[in-house]
Amino acid sequence: MLGAIDRDRYAVIPVGITREGAFVLEDDEPAKFPLDAEHLPEVVDNGSRVRWPEPGGDRTLRVVRADGSVEDLGEIDVVLPILHGPHGEDGTIQGYFDTLEVPYAGGGVLDSALCMDKHFMKIALQAAGLAVAPWVTVRRRQWDADAAAVRASAAELGLPLFVKPARAGSSVGVSKVEALDELDAAIAIAFAEDEKVLIETGVSGREIEVAILETADGTRASLPGEIVLTARGFYDFEGKYLGGDGVDVVCPAEVSHEELAAIQDAGVRAFDAVDGRGLARVDMFLTPDGGLVVNELNTMPGFTPISMFPKCWVASGLSYGDLISELIEAGLRR
Ligand SMILES: Nc1ncnc2c1ncn2[C@@H]1O[C@H](COP(=O)(O)OP(=O)(O)O)[C@@H](O)[C@H]1O
Ligand SMILES: [Mg+2]
């Protein structure tokens, strides 16, 4: 992504976040941050510390070098967050930038926080009239106090079931349950990631994803893509990131005109339902009877050139570089 930013339009100051949470001034070297299964990039603490602008002051970004010297890096117009996971896509860093009065691209506090928590995300989608898979949410204390009651409400949902942590992602802790005697193990796997767990009815249908983008002309939906599972039970972690075979990420998906319109409409409605801002990928199931069941929204979708979100925009006529410019421009308009 760093390598695809239009350098004729934008001057880039790369800021890294170390594992410990320090903001460091990074090298402007795209080759240093390849994103593939073999080498996940890591920000090394080089001793520098980036100082964000003070609220109420000017927007000058500064760096304190390892030797203690301070340098002005220039006034920032907009931050382009490229993050994943806790503090990255759950609204906390967005709130941090709001407090600093620094504009940023992409999702805001509310949509990021809502989409990080599958329980509340589903409530917001359902309230907007979108179909979601029937589910029950279980807290650890409920499970510890009365597992039999939880098993009974799970049984009412039918089989297969999907059990997942409320706040995780990347399919971590997600299990498919084909028989009720597998339920306890699936719940234990999910509780290892979060003390709040969802048990959902499994939806049979095609796994369709649509990319939503806020542009100067309003909210746009891309052509939809499809996760085609050829030899895998569901879209698990291995299939997503470890090059596990049996999964094809396809865009555009083969759908009829009516289906295309319905998918794009559901995508934009889902985006509005969570107060979406900037961008989101909306994942849904297209059922054999033509219905759409929204699975989830991702406010910080995978963004490598082979990821679904950019792929769908490229298929819709927007290049990878122009897509990044659109995101930056939406941030600048705020
Ligand atoms: N209710 C469901 N019905 C059918 N498949 C599901 C359901 N929930 C999850 N899955 C499968 O599991 C995968 C991961 O679940 P998901 O809810 O998307 O979690 P994550 O946030 O980790 O991506 C989905 O991409 C899909 O393949
Ligand atoms: Mg998912």
Image (cartoon, grey):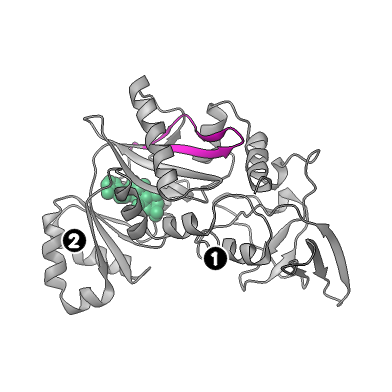
In-front residue for pair 195/53: 53
Q: Residue furthest top?
A: 257
Q: How many marks?
A: 2
Q: Using the image, determine if residue 186 lies above or below residue 257.
A: below
Residue at mark 1: 92
User: Which comes sooner in the sequence, label 2 or label 1?
Assistant: 1
Quadrant occupied by the N terminus: top right
> Which amino acid, mark 1?
Thr
In-front residue for pair 37/46: 46
Q: Which x, y percent locates residue 268?
A: 43, 38
Q: Which x, y percent locates residue 130?
A: 30, 43
> Which amino acid, mark 2?
Glu
From which residue to which does the magenta span run?
A: 208-230
Relative to 285, 325 lies left or right: right
What is the magenta segment's predominant secondary structure? strand
Q: Secondary structure at mark 1?
A: helix
Of badges 2 and 1, the one in the foreground is: 1
Q: Does residue 173 appear anywhere in the picture?
A: yes
Q: Quadrant of residue 252?
A: top left
Q: Secondary structure at mark 2?
A: helix
Disc 2 from disc 1: Cα separation: 36 Å
Q: Using the image, determine if residue 3 lies above or below residue 122.
A: above
Question: Does the magenta portion include 116?
Answer: no
Category of crowding for the residue at label 1, using alpha-carbon neighbours closer than 10 angstroms: few (below 14), some (14–19), many (at least 20): some
Residue at mark 2: 182
Q: Does residue 256 appear anywhere in the picture?
A: no
Q: Residue at x 87, y 67 (%)?
A: 71
Residue 133, numbered circle: none
Q: Which x, y percent locates residue 193?
A: 38, 68
